[in-house]
Image: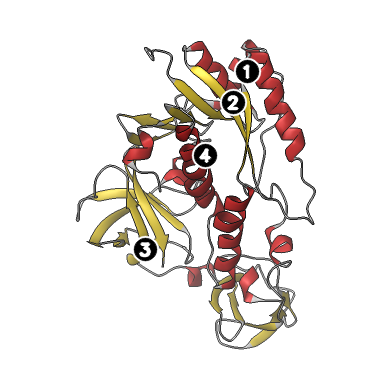
Amino acid sequence: MVNNRKKVFIGMSGGVDSSVSAALLKKQGYDVVGVFIRTWHPDFLKCNEEEERRDAMRVAAHLNIPFLTFDFEDVYKKEVADYMISEYKAGRTPNPDVMCNKEVKFGAFLNKAVSMGADYVATGHYAQNRKNNLLKGKDPTKDQAYFLWTLKQSQLLKILFPVGHLNKRDVRKLAKKFKLPVAEKKDSQGICFLGAVDLKDFLKHYIKEKKGKVLNEKGEEIGFHNGVFFHTLGERHGFVITKKSPNDGAYYVIRKDIKKNILYISQNKNYLYTQGSIVYILKDTNWIFSIPKIGKRYTAQIRYHGEFLNCEIKKINKNLTEIEFEKEILVASGQSCVLYDKDICLGGGVVI
């Protein structure tokens, strides 16, 4: 790679992926600056941010690259945490990781890095940037293109994904080869700013519990719950069944009435799906390279690591898109629906 000592600010989380990314960039001859991004964490949760920052600092020292800390706590609180809470209050199922990438990593971080002289920013995402097209990561078990559907051409011009062409096992091998201090560190889990904390426990600090009825598909009251806001379609837990028989199987949330605070459940999973093809409307759509063609067959994901579903664009109108799926699906309002043309991520939108 010929880069003429281009300057890259690499977001370093203290994990293996971003650490190997930094090492690869340096090996390729870039002028690399490591950056740890401070984010918001609620006061009632244990925070290991300083420990992660120390790990990132140790890697930067090992690689002999400069190390900076950017504080984006305010941006994170407003654009990611507050957004997620408001969406759940409205009865929708948001994806905070999408907003984290849009507003923090490729919003505030990218803008600040460029203002400080960076030619590029880089992250440890498992995705690929080829000729300013966003492609899936090579490793299907780690591919993160789903979270990046809000990116624009102007941003991709300044973004590098150093490990996107690698399998995770190879990234681990490189971490050992480079003798990185975090080579044996486990991957982090959970929502971007919560980690492995239970989502309902987090939401209960911001959304007041409100007891309501649980009805079956016939409209019969068979139990109670503590607030429809805490539930999403297809869920099997978190509500109490007071009228049941020994032969009862698992119950699934099939519908929510936000205004009346009623949760509808059924043992029949078929109630979760609309039979045959169905059209969904996406709002806030973003098309990375070009607008998809109406009538052409594409695939779509409606959740991270979800199945790639055959679909067709029926109509595109400004920031609204109608998309028809070939088979029955389960999708909740607020989820991100991301479209692909083979390995190319075209963009996506939020399900209304």
- From the top left corner, tell me how far across and down residue 32 is, in percent: 53, 20
Callouts 2 and 1 close, C-beta under 8 Å: no
- Answer above or below: position of 230 versus 336: below
Image quarter for residue 55? top right
- From the top left corner, tell me how far across and down residue 286 is, in percent: 34, 52
Which residue is drawn at the image coordinates 39% and 15% (left, top)? 3
Secondary element at image label 4: helix
> Can you identify the residue that label 4 sits on?
109
The label number, if any, that marks residue 283 in the structure image:
3
Dot 3 or dot 1: first in sequence order is 1
Where the N terminus falls, by quadrant?
top left
- From the top left corner, tell me how far across and down residue 283 is, in percent: 37, 63
Image quarter for residue 156? top left
Dot 4 or dot 2: first in sequence order is 2
The residue type indicated by label 2 comes to Gly
Dot 4 or dot 1: first in sequence order is 4
The label number, if any, that marks residue 34 in the structure image:
2
Where the C terminus falls, by quadrant?
bottom left
> Can you identify the residue that label 1 sits on?
175
Which residue is drawn at the image coordinates 45% and 48% (left, top)? 307
The residue type indicated by label 3 comes to Lys
Give the CA distance from mark 3 to mark 2. 36 Å
Secondary element at image label 2: strand
- In this image, 200 relative to 147: left or right? right
